[in-house]
């Protein structure tokens, strides 16, 4: 029976054009989703848009549009981004959908019946841009304006009637939960931040607003709309047909295996979300992974600095596999990382064009020229052939564990290392030199190297699906059913069918490009 695996991205605010941060969260989640499928899991991968709240209402007004019409348009650009990024998501949820309304109302009602909600008055700081409440010690003055210390965004003083969630009552239970589930928050450094925050003691959380209308109305008191984060977080179960907890989707996939998010929204996912779920007596997700921030030339990307790298422009110019590979190779997943066009070009040339791409090109043109375009199958492997193949095969348990612990950079480093070794092996073994005097030896070399290209392509498939699918297709391996276990299998190369045509996988980028 297939094991189930549920992975999610944050749902994005459709308030403007998708940017590199959005692309990054989604690509990272997609890589893990694809890897779990390769491991044989039945995967559900969810992404979508977070459409309510004051920020979106304001943005719609600025554009002279009704909020729903505004969201319909921009949500569509996020939906089409899933295709541009080559995401393998199984669902795309919008918080303006009926299925989501039902689920949010049910959560609200559960919190009311458990006695975790009361009506009072909120007075304090609010950032519309973060859709977050801040305490006095979390804000500072900048040029006469009040801003949040953590995000730098403007805050405003808010006083209004509000429903509260008794978050203060959950501090100890959360701390116990973190202790019992040491992998709930990763990476470790982020977990420490969250634990310290909860240890200070939590204040009750305002969970409704009355000063605008764009949201899900509070049942039985419709002048309030539900706080956008309580609304948004619930998307993860709305997509599983909650409140129908007998539904197969919900039963198969809840609790989620991992929520992939950026570090800026960790508090919402690692404090508020588990507290809501515990209070509603629902299971809590297994893991929340907070990735770092993408910087451009070491600085936060901003219009005023003119250092914004637009994912769509980059994909258009250099290709999607290239961007996917570069982002996850260059930025160490848990930390902030700087990207630049210069480094992107070097990475494409060194790792993709000169290494993996060139290896495939050289080997397949040699097979085409010298072996009637069919892979020679050989069982006469010598020690150096076996060593090359065994090295990779023996690393499989380690590679699988790296991916399951979200150590993506280590994983890539290892796989790229195999590709370097394979190039060196091909050079050193000189099949061209033995072609005439020892064709059997030439066959063994070619069999070994094609086998290794197959293995490397399977391992790289979650990261660069387009290029690796082309390679697997050309060696007649059906990509729909490739699995990690196939790496152990030397019998799947086919010596009867001719190799397909291989286009250039990665063009080298010249200096002026
Ligand atoms: N709508 C909320 C999430 C709700 S999830 C229930 C939200 N949306 S967002 O559109 O502002 O951001 C979505 C994701 O993009 C976050 O994970 C955030 O960390 C990520 N990024 C935005 N800018 C980023 C970078 N410059 N670098 C990396 N990721 C960053 O928050």
Image: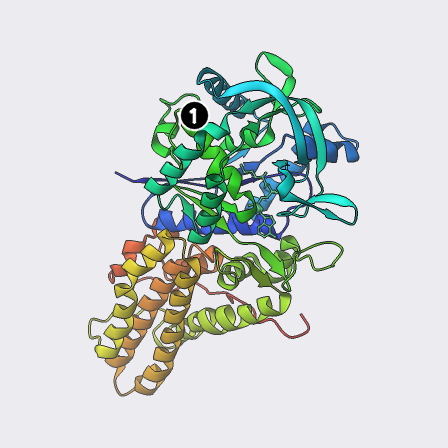
Residue 390 visible to the viewer:
yes
Residue 86 visible to the viewer:
no
User: What x and y, as percent, mark residue 400?
Assistant: 32, 55
Q: Does residue 267 appear to the left or right of 287 in the view shown?
A: right
Q: With respect to residue 204, does 109 lie above or below?
A: above
Q: Which residue in the structure is indicated by mark 1? A: 279
Q: With respect to residue 317, does 273 lie above or below?
A: above
User: What x and y, as percent, mark residue 399?
Assistant: 33, 59
Residue at point 38% right, 23% down?
245
Residue 280 or residue 179, whichever sits in front? 179
- Quarter of the figure with residue 394: bottom left
Quadrant containing the N terminus is: top left
Residue that protrudes farthest toward the top in the picture: 220
- Quarter of the figure with residue 294: bottom right
Residue at point 59% right, 45% down?
81
Q: Indicate which quadrant contains ligand 1.
A: top right
Residue that protrudes farthest toward the left in the picture: 380
Quadrant containing the C terminus is: bottom right
Q: Does residue 13 appear to the left or right of 476 in the view shown?
A: right
Residue 430 or residue 124, whichever sits in front? 124
Residue at point 62% right, 47% down?
150
Residue 255 or residue 176, whichever sits in front? 176
Q: Does residue 288 appear to the left or right of 67 in the view shown?
A: left
């Amino acid at each position: 029976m297939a094991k189930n695996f549920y992975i999610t991205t944050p749902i994005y605010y459709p308030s403007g054009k998708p940017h590199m941060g959005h692309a990054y969260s989604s690509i990272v989640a997609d890589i893990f989703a694809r890897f779990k499928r390769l491991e044989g899991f039945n995967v559900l991968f969810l992404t979508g848009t977070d459409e309510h709240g004051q920020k979106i209402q304001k943005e719609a007004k600025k554009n002279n549009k009704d909020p729903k019409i505004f969201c319909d348009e921009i949500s569509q650009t996020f939906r089409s981004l899933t295709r541009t990024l080559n995401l393998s998501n199984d669902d795309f949820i919008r918080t303006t959908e009926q299925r989501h309304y039902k689920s949010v109302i049910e959560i609200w009602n559960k919190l009311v019946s458990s006695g975790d909600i009361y009506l009072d008055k909120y007075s304090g700081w609010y950032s519309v841009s973060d859709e977050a409440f801040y305490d006095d010690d979390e804000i500072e003055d900048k040029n006469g304006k009040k801003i949040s210390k953590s995000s730098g965004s403007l805050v405003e003083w808010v006083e209004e009637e509000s429903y509260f969630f008794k978050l203060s009552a959950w501090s100890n239970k959360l701390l116990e939960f973190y202790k019992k589930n040491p992998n709930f928050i990763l990476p470790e450094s982020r977990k420490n931040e969250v634990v310290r925050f909860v240890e200070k003691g939590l204040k009750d959380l305002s969970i409704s607003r009355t000063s605008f209308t764009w949201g899900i109305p509070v049942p039985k008191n419709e002048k309030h709309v539900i706080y956008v984060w309580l609304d948004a977080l619930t998307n993860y179960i709305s997509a599983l047909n909650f409140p129908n907890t007998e539904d197969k989707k919900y039963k198969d996939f809840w609790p989620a295996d991992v929520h992939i998010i950026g570090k800026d929204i960790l508090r919402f996912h690692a404090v508020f979300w588990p507290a809501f779920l515990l209070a509603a007596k629902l299971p809590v997700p297994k893991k929340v992974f907070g990735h770092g921030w993408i910087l451009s030339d070491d600085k936060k990307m901003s219009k005023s600095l003119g250092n914004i790298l637009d994912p769509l422009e980059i994909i258009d110019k250099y290709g999607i596999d290239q961007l996917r590979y570069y982002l996850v190779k260059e930025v160490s997943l848990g930390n902030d990382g700087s990207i630049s066009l210069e480094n992107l070009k070097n990475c494409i040339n060194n790792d993709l064009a000169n290494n993996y791409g060139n290896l495939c090109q050289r080997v397949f043109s040699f097979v085409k020229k010298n072996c009637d375009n069919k892979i020679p199958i050989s069982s006469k492997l010598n020690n150096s052939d076996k060593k090359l193949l065994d090295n990779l095969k023996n690393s499989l348990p380690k590679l699988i564990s790296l991916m399951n612990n979200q150590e993506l950079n280590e994983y890539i480093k290892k796989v790229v290392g195999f590709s370097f070794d394979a190039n060196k092996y091909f050079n050193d073994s000189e099949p061209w030199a033995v072609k005439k005097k020892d064709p059997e030896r030439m066959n063994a070399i070619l069999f070994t190297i094609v086998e290794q290209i197959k293995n490397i392509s399977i391992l790289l498939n979650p990261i660069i699906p387009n290029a690796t699918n082309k390679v697997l297709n050309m060696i007649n391996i059906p990509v729909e059913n490739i699995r990690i276990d196939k790496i152990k299998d030397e019998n799947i190369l086919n010596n009867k069918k001719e190799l397909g045509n291989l286009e250039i996988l990665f063009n080298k980028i010249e200096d002026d490009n």
